[in-house]
Image (cartoon, helix red, strand yellow):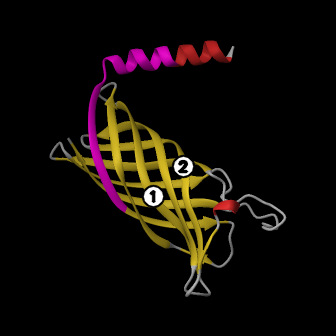
Amino acid sequence: MKKILLITLVALLGTATANAQIKFGAKAGVNLSTITDASDTELKFGFHVGGFAEFTITDVIGIQPEILYSTQGANDKNSDGGISLGYINVPVLLKVKLVEGLSAEVGPQVGFLLSSKAESEDVSISMKDYTNSLDVSAAVGLSYTFAEKFVVGARYNFGLTKIYKESENFDLDGAKPKNSVIQISFGYKF
């Protein structure tokens, strides 16, 4: 049954994208991130950079997959340290045109961990052994295209999976820390 459903989905997407108009682009911007269910944390500034493809299926509906390098984490309220996380994020967004130039975006995002560090004033410790290598989030946002090639966007990514693994050496004490990221982006369509 799963195979039939998968084949049907691939066929439908193939048919829909066969008539789709495709545009490629690059984007970059700032991240304001924190970790939910973690005490004594505050927003951390970071950045994201990467590319996207925009498949226009109808005048109103489109799909936008992206590949982004993203720095995330949280600062510690009580010290100059915090948690720094680096991901390759792959969101696949459904875009719905609201009015000329303005679109709503919603969809899943999968993040592949590249780095995880706990930092303080004079020490940086790798946390990669305690951090899950895969992060699943949901994304929701708005984007505005002007002059046909320039894009500005705002998006909120909220984590659906825990960031850290529990182990004998790393006790989460029942907490379920997840990523929470606000992104402001600027892009250009080729």
Closer to the N terminus: mark 1 or mark 2? 1
Asked if the residue at tag 2 contacts the one at tag 1, i.e. Cβ–Cβ closer than 8 Å, the answer is yes
Question: Relative to 139, is 166 above or below?
Answer: below
Neighbours of disc 2 within 10 Å: few (<14), some (14-19), many (20+): many
User: Which residue: 33% across, 37% down?
Assistant: 53
| Front-lying residue, 123 or 95 | 123
Residue 34 is situated, as x and y percent measured from the top left of the image, at: 56, 68
Point out the residue furthest to the left here: 147
Residue 77 is situated, as x and y percent measured from the top left of the image, at: 59, 83
Q: Which mark is residue 127?
A: none
Question: Relative to 8, is 169 above or below?
Answer: below
- SS at circle 2: strand
Which residue is under mark 2?
A: 111
Residue 160 is situated, as x and y percent measured from the top left of the image, at: 64, 50
Q: Which residues are magenta?
A: 10-29
| Front-lying residue, 116 or 19 | 116
User: Which residue: 32% across, 57% down?
Assistant: 28
Amino acid type, callout 1 = Ser
Amino acid type, callout 2 = Gly
Q: Which mark is residue 70?
A: 1
- In the picture, measured across the screen, residue 44 lies left or right of residue 4, that is left
- SS at circle 1: strand
Residue 30 is situated, as x and y percent measured from the top left of the image, at: 38, 64
